[in-house]
């Protein structure tokens, strides 16, 4: 996210007028009408263009003032004192005053707080804070690597100090043990007033080693004026020396009539192309667009819309993600705000290197707690962006997609009767937690702020697991107030949002459009609400009530989930990774897959917080799956110190960022995140060694027999526990197995019955957690037909493909490739053996692009399929 309060999704001007004039609707009506809280979300997001315009005007005026002061300094010899342009116009701080009165805010932790289950390496500081102002924040991290040579990037609030670039980057040549902060990325030549502004993203081409960087930017065109855009730059390693090329502006629009936000990139090692997606906001709408560039960033394709140009999508989409599998297929996912209670993740697929895409399809529905972020989050909205990754290994799950996200319970269906248990006026003075006005959840709170420094505290009891809804639906004209939950210690800031006069009731909308959030209590005790002024004074009204969890997946304000798909169409039932107690937050998950096909997911996690903070201190946790996403095990914390974001000053909004970073390759898994341990946000990195993994090497079938072979990577004489399940039933323990000196283990299972399905997996205990690897599911047929099951990839874009075949008898077979005239152009021998196997099929240079027939022939039997080659 931008350091300049870049919130995201816009509502169309027409839709905005419609929702502001619409009456409150019931849950049953939301299927065809905009839900009022969704309208409130869209209305808040629609303000972003004006905030960006104001920010540019402040920056331009600041540069003029700085130039005047520098000219004056040159005449007088008095140096210019640096000034800070904050991420938003100066307002009372939402973080520091939570203590109230004369109490001192918690700026730094007196003693480091340790995570309870550390699994990563010692954490390393990436950015160099020397010379930074006290509240300069670093967040929204990115990291990639080739072997142990790493590149990291982040949003850098120090750029506000001198009205400069607000992005930074660093390199490491020892796997992240030490880092060199390299300042800001280079600027393109010949572009007036160019500034890197936000959302740094990195990707790497594993085949060539090229690193690509993308970031949002502003610049001035002599003809069209101020521009908003996204720029890319290619970097290369030569030994341990890293060099950027010259940046290129890939897309730009008018900074005042249009806007570009939330870009993402992916490098395709098959074609060499670099794929770029971003959200564009023309005329207060919003749409997801895609472009690709060649490997040198010398040529870019014409922007192509990905999301639909319909009233329910255009103006309601944000945060596209792009990824490319190892066979050149391109996938683009984006977030869609639903107009009822549910939101959606949508996916498009390209089978021709990004030249054309399928129509978007919904791959997951979810409920979001969009009114707030996690404890200590300093932006008044928390959008649930998802992460998308693909298995590019040569293992059995090659091409598998993984989607990770966070979602809440559905609290929008519990708004009827909110605040209906009577009114509760404030009792002045209630400016601190010890003198807070008590109330009972279900009441409507009425209070007033007499000065901009006035603060109202309200106290209330919650039982662990109860879900509080707090909704402000009326406030004095011309004001903007903040609404924050505070922990029982009276100082730790929890959830947060703002509200202003646009929520006031009207004839068309008698109940207003509330601004608020849902919060789940992690422990039983007293909590507080804090109302403060960000602008103006006057009265306000706040409704409270409880939400109920029924059949929804989420348990509280946010839980992390993962789902997988082999084709982008059919997706697995989501797996919950949040195994912490109910009421503790989980936020901004990122998913990655390493070179052996192991899947990992990392997220901000609050389970290790001190009890008195009610879940107010954050770690970064990581989970792993060794069986293609079917089962996951939470390994523990990547962080060795907790972050208490409450009272952590930051000139970047959001202080934690809209995303953290997770990268995996053949030697390790790295996470990079915004961290508050030093008193303001910095970038820290930790590495999780992969260690020895178990992968399935081969499988075979014969009448009354299933043969399997696993190997340890790297080779190891390890022991494991063998499990087997039949017909998708429960796994049963079968005994301990030992790998030989070559790191291999072979199993021949003769206790099998034809016509049944058998699943196998191997388990190993690490850090007290049993992880499962090498999972395989095999159907033992009564008869063994000859089958050419599938070809991958198809279309074929490289110099070879793989054919998945099943032989009918234990005898040799052959694969033959024919062109459309029936002429044989290539063949491949298939060795004897019953059952299924994967056969590589290399293509010579004489095989050109076109449509072909592939035939599997064994004796008098044959099986045929089509193959499209596009080389």
Image (cartoon, grey):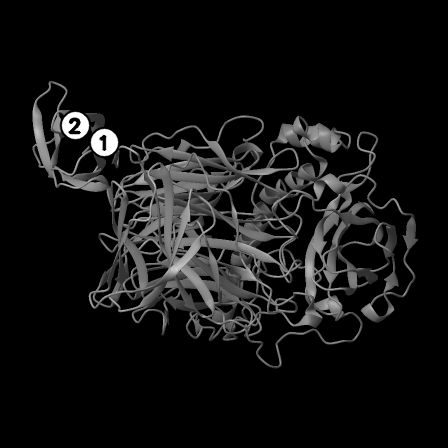
Whether 830 is drawn above or below 516: the answer is above
Q: What secondary structure is found at the residue carrying circle 1?
A: strand
x, y percent for residue 860: 12, 25
x, y percent for residue 337: 59, 37
x, y percent for residue 184: 40, 62
Q: Neighbour class for label 2 at 10 Å: few (<14), some, many (≥20)?
A: some
Question: Could you tell whether 693 is left or right of 52 in the image?
Answer: left
Name which quarter of the figure residue 344 lies in: top right
Q: Nearer the viewer, residue 408 or 55?
A: 408
Q: Nearer the viewer, residue 612 or 454?
A: 612
Sequence-earlier tag: 2 or 1: 1
Q: Residue at x 36, y 51 (%)?
A: 760
Q: Residue at x 36, y 70 (%)?
A: 176
Name which quarter of the figure residue 92 lies in: bottom right
Numbered label attached to residue 376: none
The residue labelled by disc 2 is 855
Whether 801 is drawn above or below 669: the answer is above
Numbered label attached to residue 788: 1
Residue 222 in sight here:
no
User: Quarter of the image containing the C terminus?
Assistant: top left
Residue 652 in sight here:
yes
* Labels 2 & 1 near each other (Cβ < 8 A): yes
Q: Nearer the viewer, residue 357 or 813?
A: 813
Q: Neighbour class for label 1 at 10 Å: few (<14), some, many (≥20)?
A: many
Q: CA distance from mark 2 to mark 1?
A: 8 Å
How many callouts does the rendering have? 2
Whether 122 is drawn above or below 246: the answer is below
Whether 385 is drawn above or below 377: the answer is above
Farthest residue toward the top? 821
x, y percent for residue 595: 30, 56
Q: What secondary structure is found at the residue carrying circle 2?
A: strand
């Amino acid at each position: 996210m931008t350091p300049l309060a870049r919130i995201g999704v816009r509502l169309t001007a027409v839709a905005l007028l419609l929702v502001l004039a619409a009456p409150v609707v019931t849950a049953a009506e939301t299927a065809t009408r905009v839900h009022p809280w969704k309208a409130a979300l869209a209305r808040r997001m629609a303000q972003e263009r004006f905030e960006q315009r104001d920010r540019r005007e402040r920056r331009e005026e600041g540069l003029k003032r700085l130039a005047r002061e520098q000219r004056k300094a040159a005449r007088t010899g008095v140096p210019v004192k640096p000034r800070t342009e904050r991420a938003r116009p100066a307002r009372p701080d939402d973080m520091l005053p939570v203590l109230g009165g004369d109490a001192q805010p918690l700026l730094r932790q007196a003693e480091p707080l340790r995570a309870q289950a550390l699994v990563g390496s010692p954490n390393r500081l990436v950015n160099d804070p020397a010379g930074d102002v006290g509240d300069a924040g670093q967040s929204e991290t990115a990291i990639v690597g080739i072997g142990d040579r790493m590149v990291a990037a982040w949003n850098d609030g120090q750029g506000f100090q001198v009205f400069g670039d607000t992005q930074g980057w660093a390199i490491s040549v020892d796997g992240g043990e030490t880092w060199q902060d390299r300042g800001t990325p280079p600027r393109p030549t010949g572009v007036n007033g160019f500034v890197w502004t936000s959302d740094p993203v990195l990707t790497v081409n594993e085949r060539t080693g090229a690193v690509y960087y993308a970031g949002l930017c502003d610049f001035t065109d002599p003809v069209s004026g101020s521009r908003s855009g996204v720029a890319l730059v290619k970097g290369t390693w030569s030994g341990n020396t890293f060099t950027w090329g010259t940046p290129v502006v890939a897309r730009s629009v008018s900074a005042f009539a249009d806007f570009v936000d939330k870009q993402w990139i992916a490098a395709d090692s098959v074609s060499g192309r670099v794929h770029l997606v971003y959200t564009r906001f023309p005329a207060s709408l919003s749409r997801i667009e895609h472009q690709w560039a060649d490997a040198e960033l010398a040529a870019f394709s014409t922007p192509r819309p990905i999301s639909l140009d319909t009233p329910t999508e255009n103006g309601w989409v944000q945060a596209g993600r792009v990824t490319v599998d190892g066979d050149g297929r391109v996938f683009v996912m984006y977030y869609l705000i639903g107009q009822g209670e549910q939101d959606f993740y949508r996916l498009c697929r390209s089978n021709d290197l990004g030249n054309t895409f399928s129509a978007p399809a919904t791959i997951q529905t979810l409920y979001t707690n969009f009114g707030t972020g996690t404890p200590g989050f300093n932006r008044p909205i928390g959008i649930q962006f998802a992460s998308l990754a693909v298995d590019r290994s040569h293992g059995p799950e090659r091409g598998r997609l993984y989607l990770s996200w966070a979602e809440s319970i559905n609290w929008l269906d519990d708004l009827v009767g909110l605040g209906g248990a009577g009114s509760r006026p404030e009792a002045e003075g209630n400016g601190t937690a010890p003198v807070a006005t008590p109330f009972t959840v279900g009441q409507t709170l009425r209070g007033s702020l007499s000065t901009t420094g006035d603060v109202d505290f309200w106290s209330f009891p919650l039982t662990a697991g109860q879900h509080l809804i707090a909704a402000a639906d009326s406030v004095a004209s011309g004001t903007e107030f903040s609404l924050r939950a505070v922990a029982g210690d009276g100082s730790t800031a929890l959830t947060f949002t703002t509200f202003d006069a646009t929520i006031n009731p009207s004839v068309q909308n008698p109940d207003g459009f509330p601004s608020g959030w849902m919060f789940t209590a992690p422990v039983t005790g007293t909590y507080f609400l804090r109302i403060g002024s960000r602008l103006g004074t006057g009265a306000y009204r706040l409704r409270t009530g409880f939400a109920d969890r029924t059949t929804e997946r989420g348990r509280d304000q946010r839980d992390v989930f993962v789902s997988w798909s082999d084709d982008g169409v059919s997706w697995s039932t989501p797996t919950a990774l949040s195994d912490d107690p109910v009421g503790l937050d989980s936020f901004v998950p990122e998913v990655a897959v390493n070179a052996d096909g192991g899947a990992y997911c990392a997220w901000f996690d609050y389970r290790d917080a001190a009890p008195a903070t009610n879940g107010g201190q954050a770690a970064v946790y990581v989970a792993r799956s060794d069986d293609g996403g079917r089962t996951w095990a939470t390994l523990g914390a990547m962080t060795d110190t907790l972050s208490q974001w409450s009272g952590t000053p930051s000139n970047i909004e959001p202080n934690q960022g809209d995303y953290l970073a997770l990268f995996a390759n053949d030697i390790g898994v790295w996470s990079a995140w915004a961290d508050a341990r030093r008193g303001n946000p910095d970038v820290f990195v930790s590495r999780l060694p992969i260690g020895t993994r178990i992968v399935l090497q081969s499988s075979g079938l014969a009448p009354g027999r299933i043969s399997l072979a696993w190997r340890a990577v790297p080779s190891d004489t390890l022991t494991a526990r063998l499990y087997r399940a039949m017909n998708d039933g429960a796994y049963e323990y079968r005994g301990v197995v030992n790998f030989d000196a070559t790191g291999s283990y072979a199993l021949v299972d003769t206790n099998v019955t034809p016509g049944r399905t058998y699943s196998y997996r191997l388990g190993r205990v690490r850090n007290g957690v049993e992880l499962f690897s090498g999972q395989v599911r095999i159907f033992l047929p009564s008869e063994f037909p000859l089958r050419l099951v599938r070809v991958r990839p198809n279309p074929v874009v490289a110099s070879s493909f793989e054919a998945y075949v099943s032989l009918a008898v234990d005898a040799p077979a052959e694969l033959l490739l024919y062109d459309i005239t029936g002429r044989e152009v290539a063949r491949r021998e298939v060795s004897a053996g019953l059952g299924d196997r994967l056969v590589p099929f290399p293509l010579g240079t004489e095989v050109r692009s076109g449509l072909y027939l592939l035939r599997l022939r064994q004796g008098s039997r044959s099986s045929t399929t089509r193959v499209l080659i596009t080389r």
